[in-house]
Amino acid sequence: MRSLISILSFTILTIAGLTMVSCEKEDSGGTPVVKYVRVTRPESSDSLLVGAGQGQLIAIMGENLLGAVEIWFNDQSARLTPTYISNTSILVSVPSQIPLDVSNKLKIVFSNGYELLYDFEVQISEPLVSGMESEFVNEGDIAIIRGDYFYAPLTVKFTGGVDGEIVAVTDKEIQVRVPAGASSGQIEVVTNFGATKSDFWFRDTRNSFINSDPYEGWWNSGYVVSNPGPSDPPKISGNYIRYNKFTAAWSWNELAGGPASAMPVHSKNIPDEAILKPASYNLKFEINTIKPYNNNYIKINAALSAEDNDAYVWRPPYDSKGKWQTVVIPFEEVVDSYKVKPTINPNGYWSRILVHGPGDLDADFALDNLRIVPKVIE
């Protein structure tokens, strides 16, 4: 008897449940309406949306939605699951594909041919410009810009009011040919989803404390290359330093630099704010390793009142494989390595490049444009 009662109870509940689902699914035949879009988490069901990111699951709430057969976000169709469609709601994920035609509309197409438009933005990130393989590239050569959200079609604008020729694009890298008329300053990457200017300068002329234009200092003007030969790297910014010498472990090799009095053009170029707020600045330079830097140390002094023979140590390995590349070092790391911290000196600063450390090095590398520049352009 109990078994029969249980079976009858289950049957009644099942029929009731199906009836409720049928009522929920029933299409009243009225005009479809979207009232709002919200997130799908129950605890956040009152969080309404005017846009959503790629791949995000959303709930479209309204009336007479049961006959939906297609949903489009801009010019990209979304995948519909019939069990996620009812008369009052549709659960759907925003397409991950990048739209080419941006209308900021979602469009629902119904089985009777009716189309319903609703304002809704697919929130795709504007370009992120994080750096360049080399911030110094000659006219006609290919510059490599790194970052993210590089969605074609895009444009690279150089200071000087000229655009580069796009050679290749991935989501995280742009190869662009440097045009005639490109000058020193920020670059800008423009896509359908926004425009971003770099926090670095292309061909950066700011705050150089060693760059050999003109050569200054106490040591080794013979390392300066003014007229590159067939075996020399090409110029990227006037003269550069080339160090091509077998270097025994712990031998002493000063490449460039000296006290402020010996460097009147460059010694005062470091801004006071870099001394006061080193965490807001980077030490940068360009290097071309004709042979790998795989032993010994390169020691860099900048913004000091006197030499520090043990700091800053830029350790191997590094190999640019015969190309110019930009090295970026947080300036606070440099300052933290000094025994005596820098203080503001209106008369200028001591600077030096020294090769001195453990391990023999078959050295052959070029350096240029040592500078201390802001991390962020306000």
Image: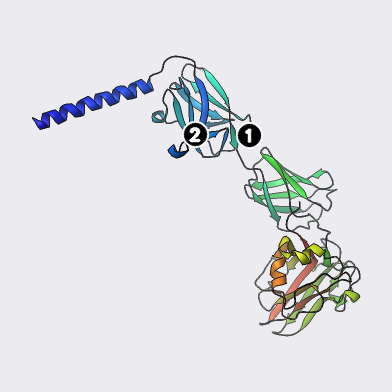
Residue 161 locus on image (x, y percent): 83, 44
Image height of 163 relative to 257, above or below: above
Crowdedness near tag 1: few (<14), some (14–19) or many (≥20) residues, C-alpha within 10 Å:
few
Residue 235 locus on image (x, y percent): 83, 62
**Which amino acid type corresponds to the residue marked 1 in the rendered image?**
Leu
Asked if residue 374 shows in the view, the reply is yes
**Which amino acid type corresponds to the residue marked 2 in the rendered image?**
Asp
Asked if residue 229 shows in the view, the reply is no
Residue 52 locus on image (x, y percent): 56, 37
Residue 167 locus on image (x, y percent): 71, 47
Task: Residue at 72%, 66% (x, y): give it.
Answer: 331
Q: Which of the 4 image quadrants contains residue 244?
A: bottom right
Residues tagged 2 and 1 counted as in contact (Cβ below 8 A)? no
Which badge, 2 or 1, comes first in the chain's sequence? 2
Residue indicated by mark 2: 46
Task: Say whether residue 63 is left or right of residue 269.
Answer: left
Q: Which SS class for mark 1?
A: loop
